Amino acid sequence: MTAIIRAKSLKKYFPIKLSFFRTLLSRTELCVRAVDGVSFDVNKGEIFGLAGESGSGKTTTGRLLLRLIEPTQGTVAFEDKDITHLDETQMKPLRRKMQIIFQDPYESLNPRMTVGDIVAEPLRVLQATQSDTETEERVKSTLEDVELTPPEEFMFRYPHEVSGGQRQRVAVARAFVLTPDFVVADEPVSMLDVSIRAEILQLMYRLVEKNKTAFLYITHDLALARHMCDRLGIMYLGKMMEMGTTEQIIYESLHPYTKALIDAVPVPDPTAKRIEVVIKGEIPSPINPPPGCRFHTRCPAFIGDICRTKEPPLIDTGNNHMVACHLYSKGK
Amino acid sequence: MVLLDVQNLTTYYSTLRGPVRAVEDVNFQLERGEAMGLAGESGCGKTTVALSLLRILPFNGKIMTGKILLRQKDIVQLSEDKLRRDIRWKGISLIFQGAMNAFNPVQKVEGQIVEAIRLHEPKVSKKEAKERVGKLFEMVGMEASRASNYPHEFSGGMRQRAMIAMALASNPDVLIADEPGTALDVIVQAQVLKLLNELKKNLNLSIIMITHDLSLITETCENLVIMYAGNIAESGDIIAMHEKPLHPYTQDLISAFPNIQAEKRRMTSIPGSPPDLLQPPSGCRFHPRCKYAMDVCRKETPKLKEAAENHYVACHLVK
């Protein structure tokens, strides 16, 4: 297994803009700690899922890896090369190798461009092809890959002339037209109807297998992640709480937060046991996150002062199953 | 006792390109204390059914035919005045889709709920209405004092709770929840579902849950109605429908759902997309996507017939 992308203690704080007088009065600069020290890597040909509630920093992490935003601290390494401080010209050749698929296919496609132009744009911007005919061929074969066939029929349509599922296929085609090594998909199916989610996921799955892409799948839907991902990371308030293979996370989850998250997923079977909601309240503000373990304010397995005062490190419990919880760090 | 009886409901939207046949020939019954799920893909007419029940369709929408009997009284025939006094909020109330944006951002939540109470029950004094808001807030698991907050001071889950409190303000018989889970995180969503279940039990409330997410329905409802392109495809007891779905669309829809507890597998989906309701396909509206489509499906619209006790299906395959 070779890691394509490696994040090391990544942090991203967004400063909060205060009014002039409040800036004078408050001594410290207030920040939203969106991502607060996250480390993981995504291997070649692997689908890594990043799951958590909204506000847990999943999307920010995805964007940091692509260097769409600058990290406050920490490093991002792409193919073992530190890319954290590269400037735009140095980044440009790498942009060919890393792409993103956005959540909302209704907003991420330019309504004034045809499907053909949308898919061709990355090739043109990054000068990945030698001639217009080559560009056209690449566009056609990619559209075929995403099952928009025959491609001639779709190339000259505008986004409003195709259905929601087909739009997301266009977005997938745009990401894969450069045959990238690393793709971030930020909630790629959450805006789609359940009946067509599966086909978009399978499409991405096939493309990942075919191109041996490293794929970061950001989602809040654990049921989908369970069927899609090889490994999963569970985030909460900018921290990685648990990380391991999908089987480890779903069947042998250790962290109380992961367990609660899994229990809260509704099961589409009327005879199954009804859900018991064990955790109360909602995710606290990332401006002033709770000290110690960030989950202690809602934790059903709270074990005392240590949770409130000491931040649990992410430790390996065996077989690369990592967890950040004092329940498992005792005696180490 | 049947509380709500919808018979042959047909609602069209008139557009410049002709009528959009959003809901056609929809029949269902709802009993007191029963929760019913209304499911289907987007654009299948779920929300139009809800809007028709309260007669709050947009200006170009019109109920063409059909009856909506609430306690044997036909809502379709009522005057606008009577509708406001007797039906809306008191008979049937609605939790709107997108709790995030359904409140007026520049007015305190308390004022908005008081307004709703006093509009439908003019005899209630302001003071009484305020007291009622406090009680409603406690009922949905919030502190009564929070009622004097503005909507932006609430989190998503609290806003959804406040929406539910508002819908319950005049003690309705039927509560319609339009996509109560979307835009909420799984944990908050589970809390809201639990609240709805409790309210149903404690108040003997009838609930119609509208969603595209079958798993939310299976967590709360006893009966299920599956709609496709404005028609009912299948309806009945949820356990029977889950164990033995008869309509090919129901079968596909159920298998398209990822189940976190099930074996890891390649998920299935329904090829194609729902039809344009300006020109719906002839015969059975599902036939272009149906893997069992026969000649008769293209020609004849299947009628909803009883396949077993409390299990209805509209498909030519079922004899």
Image (cartoon, rainbow, N blue to C red):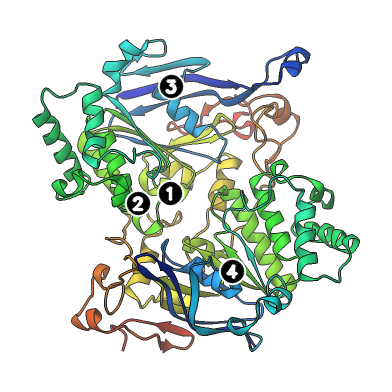
- Residue drawn at 55 percent across, 42 percent down: A258
Q: Which chain is mark 1 on?
A: A
Which element carries disc 4, helix, strand or loop?
Answer: loop
- Image quadrant containing the N terminus of chain A: top left
Does residue A111 appear to the left or right of A27 in the view shown? left
Does residue B136 appear to the left or right of A140 in the view shown? right
Residue type for callout 4: Ile
Q: Which chain is mark 4 on?
A: B
Foreground label between 2 and 1: 2
Foreground label between 4 and 3: 4
Residue type for callout 1: Met
Task: Kindly report the distance in space between the C-alpha atoms of the residues bearing marks 2 and 1.
Answer: 9 Å
Residue hosting label 1? A191
Residue A88 in picture, x, y percent from top left: 35, 13
**Do discs 1 and 3 share a chain?**
yes
Residue hosting label 4? B56
Q: Earlier in the sequence, mark 2 or mark 1?
A: 2
Residue B31 in picture, x, y percent from top left: 62, 82
Q: Earlier in the sequence, mark 3 or mark 2?
A: 3
Foreground label between 4 and 2: 4
Residue hosting label 3? A7
Which element carries disc 1, helix, strand or loop?
Answer: loop
Residue A56 placement: quadrant: top right
Q: Nearest the camera: B61 or A217?
A: B61
Does residue A8 appear to the left or right of A86 in the view shown? right
Residue type for callout 2: Gly
